[in-house]
Structure formats: C-alpha cells, structure tokens
Amino acid sequence: MAGQMLLGLSILVGLHEFGHFAAAKYFKIRVDKFYIFFDFLFPLPGVMNFALFKKKIGETEYGLGWFPLGGYVAIHGMIDETQDADSLAAEPQANEFRAKPAWQRLIVMLGGIIMNVITGIVIFSLLTFKYGESYLPASEARFGVVPSKLGKEIGFQQGDKIVKVNGRPFDDFSEVYSPEVILGSNAYYTVDRSGQLVDIPVPNNFMDRLADEGEQRFVQPLDPFRVDQVIPGSPAAKAGLQPEDQILKVGNTPIQFFPQLQEALLKNANTVEKPSLLVLFINWLRGVKPAPQPAEKITPLLVNRGGQNITLQVRVDEQGKIGFAPKSLLKFSNREYGLLQSVPVGAKQAFGVITTQAKAFAKIFRGEASFRKSVGGPIEIAQQYGGKWDWFRFWTLTGMLSMVLAFMNLLPIPALDGGHVVFLLYEMIAGRKPSDKFLENAQKVGMMLILGLMAFVLIINPLLKAFSS
C-alpha cells in the first residue's frame, strides 16, 4: 500500500511542480529549487531542513525531500512559503517572477493545475484505449438486487429490479451509483417489484449515511458466481478453497448469489479485532484494561468441486472476508475504443472526478454531508491502492488523484495556486496589484489554514475515530 501511494504521489507531485517549472522557464523566470516532497517541516522553512538527495544544475537545485506529502518549486521573486516580502525589498530584476506581466505570472501559477488535468486525461484515455470499458448491462441484472442495511432503510427489497434512474431507463448498471443520484437533489429509483412499479426516493443526506455505514454499494446485483482467484496465505487458502469452487453454504445458510455470501460471512466474522497501539494507549489513559481475547471462530464452508461436495473449515476475518476474488456468472460487456476515440471518453471520466468533488463540497457547505467523514489522509489513500500491486487499479487511482489535486489546488485559498490566481485576476481587472505586505500576510493565513487541515487529517480525525470506536 505504502509503495503504491508513494509512487503515485511522486508522479503527481513531480508533474504538478514541473508545470510551474516549465512555464517559469519559458518566460525566463529564474527557478531556485525544484523539489519532490518537502525538505523542511511544512510550512516552516529552516525547521528540520534537509534533503534525501539534491544536485544543482545551472541556476536550479533539484532535490528529493524527506517529508512525503507535497513538493515545491522556489520561483525567484515570488512571495510563497519559501520567500516573504522582506526578502524581496530590492528592486525586481528582469528574471524575477514579480517583474513579469500579470498574464505571464497567471500562466505560471496555473501551470501545475494544467499539468495535473493533462495527466488525468492522458491516464484515463490510455486506460480506455488499452482495456476498453467493462460494464454490466442493466438487462443482465435479471435476478434483481440485494440491498444492504442502508438500502433497506431507503426502501429497497431483495429481488427488486431497477428499471429507471431519475425517471429514465438506463443501459449500464453502474449508473445506479452515479453521483447524479448520490449527490443530487430529489433523486429517485424506479423498481419492478413482483410486476409492480415502485419509486424509491433518495434522501438528501444519503452521502453522509453511506459514510456512516462505510458502504459503497447499498444495492448489489444478485450475482451467481464461482471462485476465481484465492489470495495466498489468506484464510480461504489455508482452508483449502480452490479456483472454480462453487460455494453452496456458509454454516447452515444456503448460498446462490455473491451478496448472500458477503452477508453470511459478515454474520460469521471474528468480530473482536486486535486493538491498535493507539487504541491501547487511549484506553490506558482512560484507565480501561484490555479485554481478554476470545477463541477464534471457525465456520464450515460447503463447496462443490468438480461435482463433488466438500466441507472446508475457514476463519472469517473481522471484516467478513476470507480472501478470494469471485468470478461473476453474469455476462459483462466491454466497449472498445480506438486511440482517438478514447480521448473524449478519457476526458469525460477525468472531468467526472472534478464534478464529483465539486458536488461533494456543495453537500458539505449545505450541511448535508459531514466534513470530518468526507476527508481522508494518506492511510485512506494507501488503503484505496490496496495491498496487491495491480497496474490497472494503480493507474486508475493515480488518474483520479491527479484530477483531485488539480481541483484542490484551484480552490481560492491563499498559499494554494488558486489563491495566487485570485490575486492575479484582481490585478489584471483593477490595473494594480495588492501590496507585497498584504500578499505576505495572506500567504501566512493560507499556510495556517493548510497546516490546520493537515493536522486535522493526520492527527485529530484519526483520534476522533479512535475515540468513537
């Protein structure tokens, strides 16, 4: 997980900073430093200041910092985290940022965002060209759906066949999870329930409820399946599960569809998870003694292997998993695209990430979503990459993060690219720029906001989650 996250962030940060670097060089602005990751304790230059690697080529020092949550280019003559107004008291030189016209400075500040957008589009376009688009036709969900607890709460019943999303028929089953529904207002599904059409409205706080339940799929197609791959060293492998096995029962519960298996495994999970060191420390501060650990629960698994029924004994982990990938027996379809055809499809997928981010922010500002539950840090990012190296998954997530990075940097917060863009647009419209002292103070405020957000994401939010558990 850590390796994939660090590689993904290194690629994205490097390309983002290269966007600023290339634009600055094009306009003959001196760049003092180009660093992947920070060589100081962000945002306090001079504190724990050292680089893992650095080399000066020409007027620029290139380096790899030790703090792996960002990167920067030190553009000469620009008020940012590396320079303040006092350091720029002298008359501007021709190769300084502040000596250039506002439109050139604007392009330099937008360079990183533009590079991230281009990166996202390229990644999604190449993935589309190589793999096409695999999807489940809505008509293939012919057995209906099985709802989770949350799905039941909003009105779904097992066996419901979803025939319309927001009043219109649909071809791709993934449209059921579309942001237009999850993040929209007055959204609803229409289902065929034993021959009768029933509308199921989506509550406005649905995204929050998904976060509360830790769910991504509140309904799933009833999906007949076989075992595809068994993860080495997993409980399934230790129990003797093999590819092409058909699971018939978990304990005494008959299994026909994969969602039924998931539900049955959750009921048989070893629910007492070994507490982390952080939880043990918090409990120690509370004066709570660690509870004795119960014996592990072993669950019988009846499988059909080559026409013969075999009973296996398996330990279901705390998350209700045993460690195998299913092979759906539903018929998936794949859309193929040529290289040029894949570009608009990839661009649509890339900008869809930004649209989703914007809708999520709107939900937060309207009070319909919790900020605390909506933000995640490096641990959550690493978990998304997963513990198995899968290049398709790696590049998909890296493409998404590239677009998220572009969106976040465009926010009009001083110290971010978007804050600089706002001040430059003001200068271009008003015909005069804010004073250097104002820009320095705005930079400080922005840096404190970013530092506060980092502290919340890296320290406070994990502590709150630990206390709530």
Image: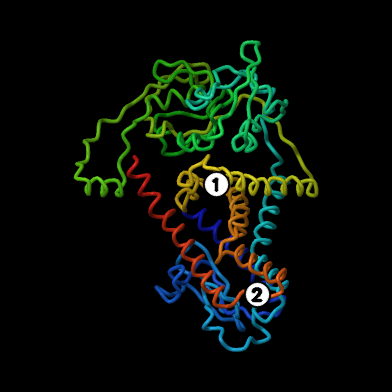
Q: Which mark is residue 221?
A: none
Q: Residue furthest bottom?
A: 90
Decide which of 438, 28 is in the foreground and name it: 438
Mark 2 secondary-structure assignment: loop
Applied colour scheme: rainbow
Q: Quadrant of residue 139?
A: top right
Decide which of 431, 15 is in the foreground and name it: 431
Height in image: 398 above or below 237?
below
Q: Residues within 10 Å of mark 2 (few under 14, many from 20)?
A: some
* Percent position of residue 101, x then y: 72, 77
Q: Which residue is mark 2?
A: 433
Can you say which quadrant of the picture contains the C terminus? top left
Residue 153 in view (yes/no): yes
Give me the residue at 40% from left, 15% from top: 252
Give me the residue at 54% from left, 18% from top: 157
Q: Which residue is mark 1?
A: 365
Q: Residues within 10 Å of mark 1 (few under 14, many from 20)?
A: few
Amino acid type, residue under disc 1 in the picture: Phe
Q: Quadrant of residue 268?
A: top left
* Percent position of residue 322, x then y: 43, 32
